Amino acid sequence: MEYLREVLTQQVAGYDQLPEVLQIFLPMLLACLLCLGLVALVPLVAIWGERKVSAHMQDRLGPMRVGGWHGWAQTIADGVKLLLKEDIIPAQADRLLFKLAPLVVFAGGFAAFVVLPFGERFIVSDLNIGVLYIAAISSLGVVGIIMAGWASNNKYALFGGMRAAAQIVSYEIPTVLAILTVVIPVGSLSMQEIVKAQSGGVFNWFIFEPVTFLAFWVVFLGTLAEVNRTPFDIPEAESELVAGYHTEYSGMRFAFFFLAEYANMFLVSALATTLFLGGWHGPGFLPGPVWFILKAVALVFVQMWLRWTLPRLRVDQLMHVSWKVLLPISFILVLAAGTLALWREGAP
Amino acid sequence: MQVEAYAGEEMVLNMGPQHPSTHGVLRLELETDGEIVRKVIPHIGYLHRCFEKHAENIDYPGVIPFCDRMDYIASMNNSLGYALAVEKLMGLEVNERVKTLRVLMAELNRVASHLLSIGTYAMDIGSFTPFLHCFREREKVLDLFEWLCGARLLYNYNWVGGVSHDIPEGFEAKTREFVTQFEPVIAELDKLLSYNKIFLERTADVGIISEEQALSHNVTGPNLRGSGIGWDLRKEEPYCGYETYDFEVPVGLGEHGPLGSCWDRYYVRVREMEQSLGLIRQALERLPEGDVHEHIPRRVRPAKSEVYDRTETPRGELGYYLVSDGGLIPFRVKVKSPCFTVLSLLPAIAKGGMVADIIAIIGSIDIVMGEIDR
Amino acid sequence: MKRYFRDIFQSVWTVLQGMKITGAHLFTRSCTLQYPSVKWELPERSRMRLFNKIEDCIGCGQCVRACPVDCIYMTTERRAKEEPPIFAADGTPIKLRVTQFDIDMSLCCYCNLCTYPCPTHCLVMTPEYEFAVQAKQDFLYRFAKDEPQAPPKPAPSPRPARAR
């Protein structure tokens, strides 16, 4: 945001003559709009990408008609269709919560985009507790999911909401612990500081260090579960719960859940990129933001790849993975990271 | 698992008839306690089309299209059973070419049916890609059938005393081509799905049908063989010259978890496909000369008698009980459905599992509602 | 303990194997047919829409009797002696005037039983499959061209009774 303000001051004539309130407020608004644009654009591309990836993995073609080249405009057409659909609220639903739930889910994903470091200066706000902020705000989604599940007054939706709550809360713990293995050597919770700690060549990225390499996979699996993707997609398990917590949703409200899911996919990939894959660092022939987005998209692709390969776990097995596999590993990793940090401090 | 420790208030969950994975229009009334299912009550009859009553008003050949529509996934096998029963009623003997063609088509149909069953089972467990891979292969079989008799699903192929069409020119080569390219697909499916750890975890320990249960509930077909009992009518009471073919009856071995689990039933189907491919090869090799319409009677008018005849369809023992009063129209047609008997076992094996296990069990017993309700 | 680690190893290993397969399929040729622009060539035996070449129809009614769902309706009347003799394409003399030959395609079950007994092979199933219509009554195909000459009988039943 500071960068945006600088640009505005230098490029826009008479900007510095504006009242100070506006000088502060305008960049905020602009940054907000940019973020919103990104949150809207990323799912559009990601949904199209997912349909294409799944199709080709299954020897199909996927959408081919709308927009000419490989049906690139399919998601836009779908979005328009969803916008124009009738807004149905079940008679027995809790109307207020029913309407509020998609907004809460979407807001949780959206707010987290604020601290993503797209480039050296492309960050809305470099909070000094950036990592903690992401972990906290992205958990807001689970509140929305429970609201949706409860308000729909549908047993399947209730099942979905309850499963989601249990799942997201359990996977939060190993994920955050594994993130600590990065925070310990860096010594800061700021996203930019973490990226800067990985500067100086590809092999300084945290994924190429033994402890953080394992932590990367714990974070990857944990976040995969937090965004409810296969093999951890039990809250919306189609063959069991019809559509889980959004069974009763249609039209634009459903689209919000859908957008939030894909925005979250990108968000967790961007988080993993920042923490382990060197963020916006990369060979100099491409600018930083491009590297950042490329790495995040690659991780999104791996998520899709997993989804179209694997069956779904059962609830108890899901908990087993979280509490009996990921959690012990992440504890050991935190211990290892701490020991390593102490040893390095003491070594010279 | 210590279920009692988590006991709470129970909730009745109505699963179906419009549910993505109840395989048609089965309705299940589940009494759930959280994720745990205390009681399952299956409700059937949503696809009842009065097949048996219809059959009492149509002449004998006219019943065949209705037989096709019972188990619409394995039409060839369904109409085969009926045709054999009527032939037995009339004392008709068909020539070798007809017999061989019937075996060929029945086995091709078995492959197609098992492919669908395996594919939808993968989807029930949550894996979508194997489903479409299976459907891709199934399409190839359906293309062969369309080439043979003009229909993709409801063939009306097995007639009383013969079959409707002889094979078209080039059919044998095309079928051999399919068999050859299909074998690696099974191996791929094994790697992608059968031995996947998550799939094993989901299926290898749930829905156990013990030997006694299977026998007491008259479970037949792959479901029975999954419990380790090697009973196959093609071996025990051969028809259409099955005794002259060389094939094995795969049974569940309990390699992963207890014997008779969902995985065993699933894997019996995979191995049955392999056996069917062998049978197709043998049938193609021997295919004798002959006229397929040679023995088709101008008028199907059996003498006053009754007969029970059973065949091995992909879902198990399908029996036809026919009563003739000497007229052109059957007096009574009664069908013994393999899916119905195995569905009656569902409440016993699904109790105490989780909601996700119910889905896994329904998928593994491979029911077709069209055959249960008729 | 040993089992715990073996399970983790097996999970990772089988997941990787599965990913290898799906990854390979990403680059194989897809088998989708872009339907309205590309069409599947149907074999000649395909059983889709029914067609009756009414000029060859001798009105024997065997198709009506064969149909298991009673979707063919036929009425005929005897041609007068003094009318000029006409023949079907294979030389069968046509003695009956077919004044109604209706097929309700929405009832048809595509079993093909009606075409086999046809003595002049005028009733056939064609490989044409794109015949969706907007209104259900458009599925009633009327093939007969001749107007009834004799005065109509009082209220004939549309479905001929079956001989038992």
Image (cartoon, coloured by chain):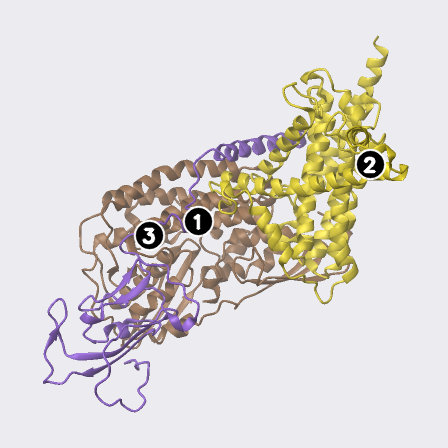
* Kind of residue indicated by mark 1: His
Kindly give the residue lying farthest to the right in the view shown.
Answer: A20
* Kind of residue indicated by mark 3: Phe
Residue at (34% x, 55% y) in the render: B237
Tag 2: Cα neighbours inside 10 Å, few (<14), some, or many (≥20)?
Answer: some
Residue at (51% x, 53% y) in the render: B365
Depth order, front residue of C163/C62: C62
Q: Is residue A2 above or below residue B28?
A: above
Instruction: Verify CB contact (< 8 Å) between mark 2 and mark 1.
Output: no
Q: Is residue A137 above or below residue B58?
A: above
Q: Which residue is mark 1?
A: B114
Quadrant that contains the C terminus of chain C: bottom left
Query: For the residues carrying marks 2 and 3, which lies nearer the camera in this image?
Result: 2
Give the letter of the chain under mark 3.
B
Q: Which residue is mark 2?
A: A133
The numbered dot on residue A183 is none
Q: Please tell me the colour of chain B.
A: brown
Instruction: Look at the numbered disc 2 and give the secondary structure of its residue.
Output: helix
Q: Is residue B132 above or below residue B87?
A: above
Q: From the viewer's perspective, tell me whether residue C33 is left or right of residue B127.
A: left
Quadrant that contains the N terminus of chain C: top right
Depth order, front residue of B287/B332: B287
* Kind of residue indicated by mark 2: Tyr
Q: From the viewer's perspective, tell me whether residue A11 is left or right of residue B295.
A: right
Rendered location of residue B234, percent (x, y) = 35, 52
User: Are the residues flagged by discs 2 and 3 from a single subunit?
Assistant: no
Which chain corresponds to the colour yellow? A
Give the letter of the chain under mark 1.
B
